[in-house]
Amino acid sequence: MSENDNSMMFYQSSEYKMDNKSESTWKFLIVDDEDEVHKLTRMVLEDYIFRGKKISFYSAYTGKEAIELLNSTPDFALIMLDVVMETDSAGLDVVKYIRETLENDLLQIVLRTGHTQAPPQEIISEYEINSYNSKVELTSSKLFTVVTASLRSYDMASSLKKVNEELRTELHNSKDVENEIQRLNQFQENVIDSADIWLHVLNENFEIVIWNKAAERISGYDKDEVIGNEKIWNFLFPDNDNRAKTIKYFHNALELNEGFDNLETQIRHKTGQFKTISWNIRIIKNKDGELKGVTALGRDITEQKMLESQFLHSQKMEAIGRLAGGIAHDFNNMLTVIRGYCELLTLKLESKTSHYKRIRHIDKAAEKAENLTSQLLAFSRQQIMKTKVIDLNNLIQDLKKMLDRLVSEDIVIITQLSQDLGNIKADPGQIEQVIMNLVINSRDAIESGGSVVISTQNVLLNDQYLLKHKEIKEGPYVLLSISDTGCGMDEETKEFIFEPFFTTKDKGKGTGLGLSTVYGIVHQSNGHILVESETGQGTIIKCFFPRIDYKEITETIFAPIPIKMYGSETILVIEDQEDVLNFATEALSLHGYRVFDALNIDSAFKICDEFSPEIDLIITDIVMPKMNGIEFVEQQLVINKDLKYIFMSGYNENMIEQNILVKGENFIQKPFSANTLLKMVRQKLDS
């Protein structure tokens, strides 16, 4: 089955919950001469539940076996049979036996075939065949739809028949026939109203004559407002194109003498809210076969569509994040070389020379590129985080003066901080970046005078919120809200605001990475972000962070000890990017170290085999062909447990998985300068 089929199974099983008290099942007869068809059908519907009951499967491999089962086992709800079988002439012969010999008009019949030729339409109508499908087209999702529609029809028809039989028995001995007829009508109306799905009936003049309780609930319109009201379609379908399409399908059902399944349209609730409805349409005939109307069953799939949209958006953001992380990784390798050689060159030049100044210009441009890659890493959630327990109120108060300087005099920044606020665990520097980026974004959205409100509070997300946002887990959160009185956003803009390089600002006024950076930091902090905005009504951005109800003990910070830059130890550098390898080797060699360089793992093994006792330190990239740097170091530690090592990488996804960033002393983030590398090398060797 495809991924879509699996997701369909999820929605079916969540829609119909199992009633543990019910021991009865729906009897389902599969007639096919291919054993694989029986197995696949059972496998797909194994956990299927409809109105609290599971399915009991019966199998027949010939038409004869099917007829024997139909005679010996009453109350089959659904039969799914092959039109043409090699064992004997089944298919329509069994259908005729059911309808003519057994006179069973309740059993729902579904035909399927491996051939392309369908039975004549008059046969399908005469024998009331519920559905006809090609085996190739009958995917698991369509099988669920067919089975659900069939069982719903069987359930409703059985209920009506049972009610009619009971009332006929009572009417036989009743003196007041008129009252009994009224009671029959009331019973039938109660059965229709008890259905959990929208049901309305149109007569041959396209007038609504039945409108059940579910239709009232889903649409907001009472039966009295609908029956006899020709203008109701204008209210339900205010969009002309949508209304025309829907009415056309209903008319076609009458004129062409055929129904249809799973037509999706939008209706407008009485309150103005739009809902998505999936329609199944069936025609109504009298005993002479004349068309008398249309029955419409509508299922509200608004929430299902919303969840599908959220899932697709999440997948899109994940894909963009991986792309951004990959780009940042490659750029970090290049920037390591550019900035590293700039640094080495400036060491050999006088600061007043023109070459020195030109090299500094190159380095400044590379520094700006480094900031861009840092933002891309933040969005893709691959940034190195130095997390600790934070009092968000204190952080905001410390940041307030800087924030006031970021906005113009006609914009007021207001703080509304909850006094009993819980703590959060995150990187303080990155949370400051989140707040500053959001305030700057609010500032740019305010055209002439206004306010930005920064507020905090403890929240416990309720069930209604969790239903709309499946990606967030239940539990206590700290809510950071930043709202403004700016121009706001329309729905189309809100859909793209977190994507890298998307901006509504004028050219040169923004990189389009501010909100994407916020998105990445919040999610990497195990948080969740929500945007509320309307054009002309301002914007509220809410950041939810998991609440921590304890404080972290602050470690005593000692003054740093000066680190010398030179040494004479032996170092092995492993890096598959030749430019980065050459830069690191040259920087270390210029400062007195004996350096072996390896462009791949094979070369590194050869060097270790020959010089292992002499090597004091290994510096290795993590992401390498054949074997990553972590695995290589682990193998060398078996030989020399006192061996010292430093890992380097352009992004941290692999390090998080390997759990090596306990304190950060074994890792250097690309791009790095020669000065940073030399300090860390000396630190490791002297530790």
Image (tube, rainbow, N blue to C red):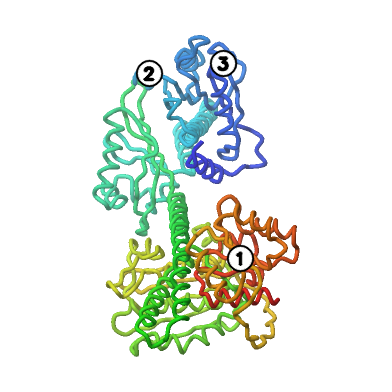
Q: What residue type is labelled 3?
A: Tyr
Badge 2 crowding class, 10 Å Cα cut-off, few under 14, some 14 to 19, many 20 or more, is: few
Q: How far apart are marks 2 and 1 (CA)?
A: 74 Å
Residue under pointer 1: 619
Real-space CA distance between mark 2 and mark 3, rounded to the nearest whole angstrom? 21 Å
Q: SS of the residue at dot 2?
A: loop
Q: Is 619 rendered above or below residue 205?
A: below
Q: For this rendering, which residue is in front, 630 or 413? A: 630
Depth check: 78 or 295 in front?
78
Circle number at residue 119 = 2
Quadrant assignment, res 501: bottom left
Determine whether 653 is above or below 236 in the image: below
Q: Which is in the foreground here, disc 1 or disc 3?
A: 1
- Judging by the rendered image, the residue that carries numbered circle 3 is 61
* Mark closer to the observer (2, 1): 1
Q: Residues within 10 Å of mark 1 (few under 14, many from 20)?
A: many
Nearer to us in this view, 575 or 250: 575
Which of the image's four quarters has the C terminus? bottom right
Other residues around mark 3 within 10 Å, as few (<14) / some (14–19) / many (≥20): many
Q: Is residue 346 visible?
A: yes
Residue ID at (48%, 37%): 141
Say if 299 sits above or below 388 in the image.
above
- The residue positioned 40% from the left and 74% from the top of the image is 368
Under tag 1, what secondary structure? strand
Residue 246 in percent (x, y) is at 30, 42
Residue 280 spot, x, y in % from top left: 39, 37
Closer to the observer: label 2 or label 3? 3
Please name the amino acid that badge 2 sits on.
Answer: Pro
